[in-house]
Image (cartoon, coloured by chain):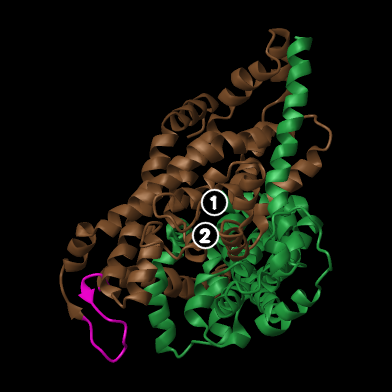
Chain colours: A green, B brown
Amino acid sequence: MTLSRRIFAPVSYVFAILCSAMFLYPLLFTFQASLKDNTEIYNDKPFAMPVQWLWTNYSEAMRDGGIGRAVFNSAMYAASGTALALLLGVMAAFALSRFQYRLRNAAYLYFTTGLMIPVFSLIIPISRMIGTVDGFNKHWTLILLYGVFELPFTIFLITGYMKGISRELDESAAVDGCPPAVLLFRILLPLSMPAVSTAGILAFFDIYNDLIWNVLLVSKDSMYNISVALMSFIGEHGTARMGPMFAGIMITIVPTIVVYLLFQERVESGLSAGAVKE
Amino acid sequence: MYGRKVYVTISLFLIPVFLLYTLAFIVPVAQTAYQSLFSWNGIRSVPMTYVGLDNYVQMFKSEEFYRALRNVGVFILASFVLILPIGFALALIVTSKMKGKRFFKVAYFIPSILPLTSVGLMWQFLLKGDGGLVNTLLELVGLSGLRHEWLGEPSIAIYVIVVVNAWIYFGLNMIIFASGIVAIPDDLYEAGALEGAIGWKRVLFITVPLMKETFKVFSVLAVTQSLRVFGQIYVMTGGGPNGATDVPTTLLYNQSFKYNNFGMGNSIGTFIIVAGFLSTLILNRLMDGDGATRKRAKGRKGGRP
């Protein structure tokens, strides 16, 4: 017994540490490379720290690549889209969870069907639709689309949670003459915060990381999000100078790491809830 | 409770959601299916021409389509032979009593939160044939014979992408497995320990059998998520070299927005939607099999329908 335990523990530590290296080293290398010039990046000493820390790589990524603006755009799309999804989602969840009427289950099924529809398969009709309303390069189309795409999951998650809150609250609110909207936003919404914040975090990450809709619907570089800005920065400058490219990548990933470290548990449960939604 | 007036509120709350959702999901699904019967070059002033099932014939005849399906198969396979064992091992680590497990959890999870495009581009650089980190490291350990143009060689590119994809999502699946592990009550382990179930035996004879439900969820995910892979491939290879890494979603994108063959694009889109629906429904049915019987038995005992 003790023998197998004595072998088991060190082996699992070695495995755990090797895995940490496997996940963290590429990021560490990217950080080092973001401060180097080409000769240093391409030499045979990948572990060496930069001889001279070239912070100019970062200012170049900001200035020539517009990466700073792209981070701002992505965060703005994500914040607005998430707010829209949560507002609409909370209202729908309220109507779907606290009342009895004939079409309720049908409506719930209708909305959650969206969970099974991969949005990538809809890129042709949606970009046509956006074309007919002249919605290319417009903030409102992007935000509306981003928000609505998050609705099925938001509705699914918040409806499920609200169903678990005691109905007696509604009855006493009704007796006290409290209108339904006040019941929702003053009483039920604060009680549903765990589900709302999980849905919100998932939506925020989803939209911040978007690729396809910004590719299809935006051609003005002042509206690029991180994905498109990075790809076009690299497309224009090629790999002639790698330092600024790595710096650009670092600028886009640092905000997500900060958000993750601040809200570890929420982010972990939010993203895994998003994965197992089906 | 509220009187009849409340139905006004319900309608006011549901109608905007209904309209937006219908416009963004249901109408486009119908359009994709309908327009897959037409040929169109993407220019709005040019009318679509009805071609019946020609797009489907073309799709089912094309080698690219089958290659894309095979590549989805590679993703599904990798979920089981790569992500499942390693994700599960990581979950055991972060739910154990090891020192530093908090750090390990963060380290393993970080790739899952990074923007897909940034990670894809990072790996594209690290995997470059000439001066990329992976090749440099191989040389440093004396394995220069293994050097490759990792994303540029058609025979290996899809496997390289699948490994990068696994690197990204190990952490997310670790969390899914970990939530299954912590749901197992401690007294079962204590009882098992009395019978000699410790170390690897404890994992094999207590943890794994009790996590059946989690493994079922994982299996459904492995299939449905593999059908949706897009960003990783779009960023790293765009489906190349020469279509070797295409999956249905990138095929759809390339056919329509690169080659202006929107009819074919729509038939691929219809295929993805139908395949997604069918696989979700069939897998859930299959996986629910014994779970449903158990639930029914419980219901009878409790006297509730």
Q: Are marks 2 and 1 in contact (CB under 8 Å)?
A: yes
Residue B55 as seen in the image, left or right of residue B301: left
Asked if residue A18 is positioned above or below residue A56 in the image, the reply reads: above
The amino acid pointed to by label 2 is Gln
**Which one is nearer the viewer's eye here, B294 or A152?**
A152
* Residue indicated by mark 2: B232
**Which one is nearer the viewer's eye here, A210 or A109?**
A210
Query: Which residues fall within the magenta stretch?
Result: B35-48
- Mark drawn on residue B165: 1
Answer whether residue B138 is magenta in the image: no
Kindly tell me whether residue B13 is visible in this rendering.
Answer: no
Residue A76 at x, y percent in the picture: 68, 77
- Mark 2 lies on a secondary structure that is helix
The amino acid pointed to by label 1 is Asn
Residue B52 as seen in the image, left or right of residue A139: left
- Mark 1 lies on a secondary structure that is helix
Q: Residue at x 32, y 53 (%)?
A: B67
Q: Chain of mark 1?
A: B
Residue B243 as seen in the image, left or right of residue A88: left
Asked if residue A44 is positioned above or below residue B2 in the image, the reply reads: above
Q: Chain of mark 2?
A: B
Quarter of the image where one finds residue A241 = bottom right
Residue B279 at x, y percent in the picture: 37, 47
Kindly tell me whether residue B32 is visible in this rendering.
Answer: yes
- Badge 1 crowding class, 10 Å Cα cut-off, few under 14, some 14 to 19, many 20 or more, is many
